[in-house]
Amino acid sequence: MTFNPAQRSRSFPVLTLREKLNGVYYQLHLILRARFIFSSLALIIMVVSCATPHIQPTDTKLLFNSELLGFIQDGITTREEVVLKLGTPSAQFEGEKILTYQLRVDKAGNWHLVAPQISTTTGFREWREETCSLVLVFGADGVLQKHSLVEAK
Amino acid sequence: MDGLAGNQIVLTSHENLFSGPGCQLWKGMIKRCFPFLASFFLVALVGCVVIPTQEHLIEGRGKIDESDIAFLTVSKTTREDVLLRFGEPDLILNDQRIMIYHWIVSHGYWLTGGGYSAVGGPISNDYLFMLEFDEEDRLKRFERSGRGVIEAMWFPTLGRIDNWTPLGSKELSRPDGRLLRRNIFIDPIPSTCAQNFTLDVESQPTRFRVGNFYDSRASCHTGTFIGYMEDPLNHLYADVQTCRPANVMIRAAVTNQLQAMGHKVVSKDADVTITGKIRKFEVTTSSNWPKYVFLGSLDVILEVQPSAGTNAKNIRRYKAKAKHVPTKLFGWTYSDIEEIEENYEQVIQACLEDMQRQMASDAELARLLSRRTQ
């Protein structure tokens, strides 16, 4: 290899068509490779960030300030009021002492009742994402004694 | 090849190439090494990839950790405490004696492929949290257990539940882990009937309060079970269940009917309180060759108690029956599930409507509910 002073003085080398095409392919290859790396990273981050939701009781203040369940108050609300306003419970226990409802919140923060779904193959309840369970415990006089909102987060 | 120049062509024959002593040696070696070579290529072509991830939920509502169940005390914790803490269970068995929470989490994914095909799936753990309560609604025993993906093949979820539930419980699973019987869920919504009755001009609408409707059926299970579907050989084929408990459904039908008759439902200061007792609410299938007949029956006792005055209860009893004969002949399969559900729904709906018709034409009930203007 010999030293050519003319080549050194050039700031931009003159490329042939083949060399130009190779450069375009190389750039395209780099872009695709970068996209692959970023999409793989995004996938890994998505999968890793999906932590297991944990079943726990939550603060019911927000829920009971809502339009749907604003009427619910311990010691005041009766079973009849609940059934007339919320309809059929998703489950009931110990006769009609304990009623449960399934609820979900939309993006606007409004609460909705959810019809319970049961798997026909396993018999287990099927839960939509972010569905909460509202548990209402009534006394012998039919008045609400305790309540709880259990969510998975 | 040392004596040859770079641009010379060497002519040879097939015999020279494949019958020389060197070639025979190679052939022998290839024959002996064939199993090893085949294994090498198989391993090279078939790959297995394991992608570990953070634990995440793939089935169920959410997980319940050991620390969450630390508060449970046998003979002390009540069903109410459990429900307030964990919410509605995923499965309820043995007349609510057993409650089960179920969830599956994944710790990663496996992927294996060979040639042009590939298979994969989650590396999962299947968890069950099972609780049994006694007659006084207190905790009798509980267990929280998990099974890995391999163990789950030998110990399917429903089989584990069968093993845990007491003897004499309704068996859930077959050895293959599938349900022993299928479930048919129906939600009949009867239309009210008020044409036979109008309020007397001198009467005012009665304010009524609807109390408890007690389900006294022996086979009520969770209150939603209403019968079995049998195949032509009288083998049990499916459990028929209502989406809403029977007492809730019948109470709604009674309330709607009384409202349609012009009375007003209230929660306080009622003139009368109406309670009920369900003696019968069931569907059966009869094989009346070559047709399949759906039969429904209902037996309800209503107790009408005036809020003021005497404590005497006035009892009205309504018995309703309905029969539905679909045009289709024998040969139902589970793929006809929607049609089967419709037939059961129609027959139960007809029963409820029959009860409502009887209420509408019951002069004694009308007298009990009449509230004369002063």
Image: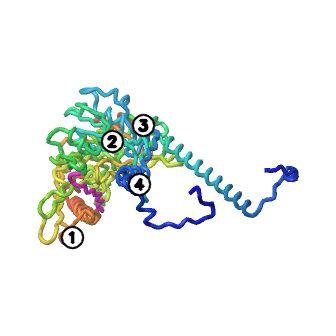
Q: CA distance from mark 4 to mark 3?
A: 64 Å
Q: Which residue is mark 2?
A: B102
Q: Earlier in the sequence, mark 4 or mark 2?
A: 4
Instruction: Find residue B26 and name its label.
Output: 4
Please name which of the two marks, 1 or 2, marks the residue nearer to the observer: 2
Q: Amino acid at mark 2?
A: His
Read off the chain for label 1. Answer: B
Q: Which residues are magenta?
A: B179-193
Tell which of B210 and B8 is nearer to you.
Answer: B8
Whether labels 4 and 3 belong to a single chain: the reply is no
The residue sitting at 14% across, 72% down in the picture is B290
Q: Which residue is mark 1?
A: B326
Q: Any magenta on residue A126?
A: no
Q: CA distance from mark 3 to mark 2?
A: 13 Å
Q: Amino acid at mark 4?
A: Trp
Binning the other alpha carbons within 10 Å of mark 2 as few (below 14), some (14 to 19) or many (20 upward) gives many
Q: Amino acid at mark 1?
A: Pro
Q: Which residue is mark 3?
A: A54
As drawn, the residue found furthest toward the front would be B3
Q: Amino acid at mark 3?
A: His
SS at circle 1:
loop
Please name which of the two marks, 4 or 1, marks the residue nearer to the observer: 4
Tell which of B255 and A39 is nearer to you.
Answer: A39
Q: Quadrant of residue B330?
A: bottom left
Whether labels 1 and 3 belong to a single chain: the reply is no
The percent coordinates of residue B76 (x first, y second) are 26, 26
